[in-house]
Image: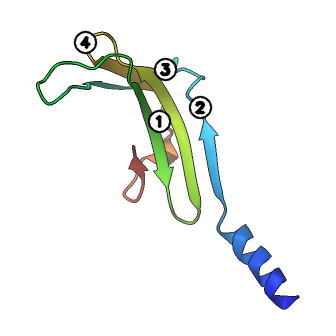
């Protein structure tokens, strides 16, 4: 019985959370990520999904999907989303 209680407690301490804000859009203080997806011969690849997310690992796993889009016929994309102030810092990551 004690092992079961310990396992439940351990799992509750190491939870993860994922938030999808990609459909919200951005009206002010937006961040724009612009790029191109290409093959080895430098030709663009169309219709590739590109996503921009904030990822935090401490004190728990947390991912917020900020925005997503698809590449155009030449492989170009622009993602526009809002980065929250608390997401800017030394230990946080964007992917």
Q: Nearer the viewer, mark 4 or mark 3?
A: 4
Q: What residue is drawn where x is 38% and y is 17%?
A: 47
Camera-near label (3 vs 2) is 2
Q: Marks 1/2: CA distance?
A: 11 Å
Q: In 3D space, how far apart are the residues under numbered discs 4 and 3 (Cα atoms)?
A: 28 Å
Q: Is 10 situated left or right of 27 in this image? A: right
Of mark 1 and mark 2, the one earlier in the sequence is 2
Distance CA(mark 2)–CA(mark 4): 27 Å
Residue that carries the numbered disc 2 in the rendered image: 21
Quadrant of the image containing the N terminus: bottom right
Q: Nearest the camera: 87 or 6?
A: 6
Please indicate whether residue 81 sits to the left or right of residue 14 in the image: left
Residue on which the image places disc 4: 74
* The quadrant where residue 91 appears: bottom left
Q: Residue at x 44, y 21 (%)?
A: 69
- On residue 28, the disc is 3
**Distance between the alpha carbons at the discs numbered 1 and 3:** 11 Å
Q: Nearer the viewer, mark 1 or mark 2?
A: 2
Q: Is residue 29 visible?
A: no
- Which is more toward the observer, 23 or 28? 23
Circle 1 — which element? loop
Q: Which mark is residue 58?
A: none
Residue 23 placement (x, y as % from top left): 59, 23
Pick whichever of labels 3 and 2 is earlier in the sequence. Answer: 2
Task: Say which of 39 and 49 sits in front.
Answer: 39
Can residue 18 be seen here?
Answer: yes
């Amino acid at each position: 019985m004690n092992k079961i209680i310990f396992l439940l407690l351990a799992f509750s301490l190491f939870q993860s959370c994922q938030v999808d804000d990609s459909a919200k859009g951005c009206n002010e203080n937006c961040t724009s990520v612009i790029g191109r997806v290409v093959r080895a011969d430098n030709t663009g690849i169309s219709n590739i999904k590109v996503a921009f997310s904030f990822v935090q690992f401490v004190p728990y796993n947390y991912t917020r999907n900020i925005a997503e889009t698809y590449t155009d016929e030449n492989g170009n994309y622009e993602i526009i989303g809002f980065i929250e102030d608390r997401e800017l810092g030394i230990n946080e990551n964007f992917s």
